[in-house]
Amino acid sequence: MTTGRQYLRAHQRDHSLVLLAAAEFAALIGNGNTDLPARHAEHFSRVLRRTPGWNAIVGNGVDRICAAVIEAGKIRLKPETDGRALEFEAQAHRVSIAQAWIKPKALSLVLQKCAELGVAEILLFDSAYSAPRSEKPYRIDAILENACMQAYNPVKPAVRFVDNVAALQNARQPALFGDPTANVWLNPAGAAKDSIFICGPEGGFSATEMQALRTFASGVLISENVLRAETAAIIAAGILCLGK
């Protein structure tokens, strides 16, 4: 039986990936066709320069995809789909990135790269030196959706908003954070199957936050140099997502 991931790998060279919201995807499967969302129209026509009648792999951003054709602003299921969608097998491991709020441009970069690398969940939290909450949920979703489509990643990271460092503690998910005083390097081979890496803001964590972190998270080194907040998050995501 062909799985969703196998189908995607086999067809991504001549198919564009289109991600839809849950209701949009349900309409496509139920009716056999649906409108191409306006938020995608400009991207595929002007940026990717797709001509009428191009092939697409359409997904719900969670666990299903199907083959379709895009014509005249409509998404139409291919006959071989037969009203069914292929499912994804569960990921062998789930990587979460917790990022303190940082400046909008830097945050956008973190969101894009986490989506490209295959991070399962992104937690955005307030800290003593974090930037104000600048991005709206709909804008964050749009950044992730576009990054996933460009990277052919059919699973969009889930996003949660957290009040502070202490609220990141989760007994079921071992936590790691960058600590320049640590003597252990971040190593995916030694990380748990499901893990979360906690990244601070541009100004770093306060002494109180560091004390709280050390009660439930393990400090690790990710570089011998002092990294920007967004660089640290992207490197940690890359090591944990691609190193296994």
Image (cartoon, grey):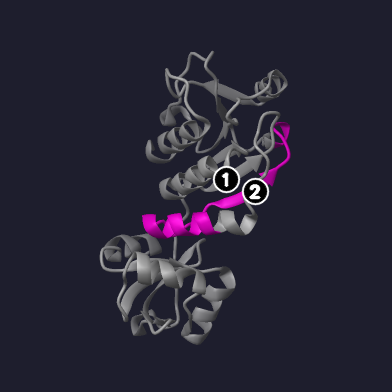
Residue 185 placement: quadrant: top left
Q: 227 above or below 194? A: above
Q: Name the residue under label 2.
A: 160
Seen at 69% across and 32% down, the residue is 127
Q: Give the range drawn in magenta.
A: 142-167
Q: Which of marks 1 and 2 is nearer the N terminus?
A: 1
Query: Residue 75 location, x and y as percent?
Result: 43, 80
- Examine the rendering and report whether any part of residue 65 can be seen: no
Total marks placed: 2
Q: Is residue 156 magenta?
A: yes
Estimate the x, y position of residue 230 in percent, counting from the top left. 50, 35
For the residues bearing labels 1 and 2, Cβ distance under 8 angstroms: yes
Side of 240 relative to 26 (left or right): left
Q: From the image, which quarter does the N terminus lie in?
A: bottom left
SS class, disc 1:
strand
Q: Can residue 52 be seen in this view?
A: yes
Q: Are there few (<14), some (14-19), or many (20+) residues within 10 Å of tag 1?
A: many
Q: Residue 109 carries which label?
A: none
Q: Which of 185 and 226 is in front in this view?
A: 226
**Left or right: 177 in relation to 235:** right
Q: Position of residue 7 (x, y in %)?
A: 33, 65
Q: Residue 122 carries which label?
A: 1
